[in-house]
Amino acid sequence: MTVTTAAPAAYACDEARWQAVHDRDVRADGHFCYVVTTTGVYSRPSCTVKLARRENVRFFPTPEQARAEGYRPCRRCYPDDSGRHAVAVRAVARACRIMDEASLPPSLDELARKVGYSRFHFHRMFKSFTGITPHAYLAAARARRVREALPRSGTIADAVYSSGFNSGGHFYAAATEILGMTPKAYRAGGDGAVIRYTVAGSSLGPVLVAVTDKGVCGVLTGDEAPALLHQLHGMFRQALLVRADGEFAAAVAAAVREAEPPQLGRELPLRVRRVALAVRVRRAVPAVCAPHG
Ligand SMILES: [Zn+2]
């Protein structure tokens, strides 16, 4: 196989290239692409598609060369079209902004249309860039609004309706999952709750996870752990906060590792990527550490 002079020494042999594909190493993107001969599809090294068997993989210095041999570009990582990839990233970021700001959530059809894609294509693209569905992002935006509104609003009902829930019943059905305690307790600064928390590291900065005996009451992301701790204390002034180590911390660390959003969306705004991470952490945490009563 030909080795381009442009490729750094690190990707100069097939072994190093295979290692990069195995690790889905984004630094290798642009240096070469690989073909899975059984599917006839070529990808960037960082593509999130299921890892192929080594014996079915061929390397090419450029996407053009793979195409010239009759292979097709992957529809997940757009290996030969960085322009198209950038357009897709911008569309996903714009859709997230719309969902963050809309008090009345748009339908998935409307949302896809607004950013210039069909519903089907948009859904698949959103999920492959963020690791969550547009619906999950929308639910997270609404949950964030209600968490912020609860302590400030005159009544629980005011907070619920101003956050975009179309019925109180809908909110109450999801309240424990969103708040990790009753709306009344949440509103009162976690009054009476015992909250265990820990901080785990992620590629997007520290992640603070806090739980009660009912469920997850906080997943906070940011640049600095002390700021997250400060935020937690501000949210739950009336609760007993207990820093938990050992088994709980290890389980949370594993859940956070598991929840890392896909590399394909690494050009999305950090804020969007942290929302996706938090959604995925919330899903992973109850499974790995059933709270003690
Ligand atoms: Zn691909």
Image (cartoon, grey):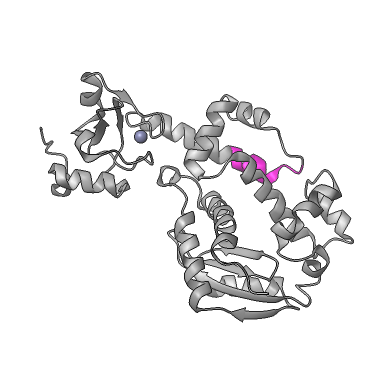
Residue 84 in sight in this render? yes
Measured as percent of width and height from the top left, residue 220 is found at 59, 64
Q: Let me know if residue 267 is in the magenta part.
A: no
Q: Is residue 216 left or right of residue 25?
A: right
Q: Is residue 40 above or below residue 140?
A: above
Q: Is residue 287 left or right of residue 29?
A: right
Quarter of the image for residue 216 reads bottom right
Which residue is rendered at x = 85% and y = 50% of the image? Answer: 168
Measured as percent of width and height from the top left, residue 40 is found at 29, 25
Quarter of the image for residue 194 reads bottom right
Measured as percent of width and height from the top left, residue 6 is found at 16, 39
Residue 224 in sight in this render? no
- Highlighted magenta segment, given as a residue range: 95-103
Which residue is rendered at x = 56% and y = 78% of the image? Answer: 244
The quadrant of the rendered image in which ligand 1 is seen is top left
Which residue is rendered at x = 64% and y = 71% of the image? Answer: 231
Measured as percent of width and height from the top left, residue 251 is found at 50, 68
Q: Let me know if residue 101 is in the magenta part.
A: yes
- Helix, strand or loop for the magenta stretch, by majority: helix
Which residue is rendered at x = 68% and y = 47% of the image? Answer: 139
Frontmost residue, 56 versus 223: 56
Frontmost residue, 64 versus 213: 213
Q: Is residue 40 left or right of residue 275?
A: left
* Quadrant of the image containing the C terminus: bottom right
